[in-house]
Amino acid sequence: MVNLVDLMTGPQLYRKFLQGEHKYTIPEYLGNTTMSFCRGLFYFSTSLAFGPVIVCYLYNRNYLQPQTILFILKYAGLMAMFGLMGRFIGRSMDPLYKEFIGIYAKARASGKPEDNDALKQFDFELFGVNADYTALPNKDLWYNQPNETNANPFTKIASLYAIKSFGRHMLYPGSMALLNYLLHNNLQLARGLLVTRKGGKRVWIRSTQGDLIDAMYVSAPEFVPDERKDTLVICCEGNAGFYEIGIVSTPAELGYHVLGWNHPGFGESSGLPYPERTLAAADSVMQYAINVLKFKEENIVLFGWSIGGYPSSWLAANYPKIKGLVLDATFDDVLPLAIARMPKFLSGVVEYAVRNHFNLEIHRILAKYKGPLRLIRRLQEEILTTDDTGGEEEKRASNRANFLLKEVIKVRHPDVIHNLEPLVDRWLAMSPNERAMSAHESMNTGNGEILAKLFQVCDHYLVDFDATHVTPLDPGYFNIPTEYRE
């Protein structure tokens, strides 16, 4: 028998994968809408960005009186009761929801894998479920520790407030409730297509930080080359990317096994995307790939796009035997990008906030990884540039992917780039034809051998893709990197 409380408080059902989108009854639709409105109003009024403004407004209007607060609580309670009753009545009239909530309650109570598998025939609001895999703590993991920076008390308080109120949302807009709400239907549809057309298997993974990470595993088709059939690509999405509509499609189209996952707070993943929680989520996905899917470390390729280069580079540093690392539209350090987009008088606060709370220094993390690496630079990049005042040449020169390439060469080939860093900038500004001609001409100069080697190193690590930051990567540009050999 269906639990009456579950009918009121159970998760929202989106669809049964093989039956299409779930059609809500009118009472449940009204109940869900009311509960969503109440939730949004609560988040808005209690957020650090808007909460203090609301409190100041109420204070100036002399509304912070006991009777006013009781009045607000009274009507908030009435709205919540209306929403819950709408859900209860509507769901009681819905045979599909009663079927779902019965399976949901059974899976939650038993914790058995077979009950979880039965539950996965439904797409629903993800909470209260048992994880398919719980990550194990690993004390041997390496973390990039920021350099200590001194600051006065005001800067420390201001930076903490900035990060908690709006900084995190600027770095990870995919965790904003508003964006998740706007993309909700698209994510549902795309998730359904991954399951029904690609044979995707949904996976729920519990990280060591306690977050439930929503992931999707798409196995390789039967008739693909053995090399691809033996290779798993783990995809790390960008700051507004989701596995449902993100970079998973590129390696999947090429026939690789693919494991995509959403950052904490993105889509149906719980939590918030602070660095320690993002890295814990990434490690839990890696553990699942090795311990459950049984892929060897040397058969795993890490693919990171944009800010996804941060967790993918960190995984490469901690799992150095991987087959390769592909970084698409990725930066060297988030600090120059943050400073470029904030008022100059706040640069001190921005620097302290980034270095102490969101220290995403990808180039320092990559210094720990010596394996196969491929960088993909977007020629029409508009997100990772710091100079938008000049022409196309100046804008392209300020692409932080350029600086990432130079840092990689400094660490891996210090003798090659010594005193020749401006020549790397020159190579980066060239077209493919100009690079070919330059390589030929350099052989006829006095230091031709050194220049030829430098350009060869640049060409090995970096490839240009003529597209904007958010354009899906052409599968032709996704190539598994190899070790550099002279």
Image (cartoon, rainbow, N blue to C red):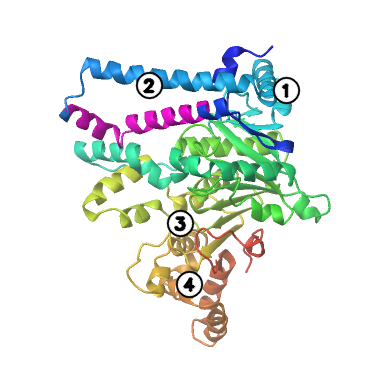
Give the numbered dot on residue 76.
2
Q: CA distance from mark 1 to mark 4?
A: 54 Å
In the rendered image, the residue lying farthest to the front is 26
Image quarter where the C terminus lies is bottom right
Q: Earlier in the sequence, mark 2 or mark 1?
A: 2
* Quarter residue 61 falls in: top left
Give the numbered dot on residue 428.
4
Identify residue for label 1.
115
Identify residue for label 3.
331
Residue at 61% x, 45% y is 244
Residue at 35% x, 52% y is 338
Image coords of residue 168 (percent x, y): 39, 41
Count of numbered circles in the view: 4
Q: Is residue 56 magenta?
A: yes
Q: CA distance from mark 3 to mark 2?
A: 45 Å
Three-letter amino acid code at the position of disc 1: Asp
Q: Earlier in the sequence, mark 4 or mark 2?
A: 2
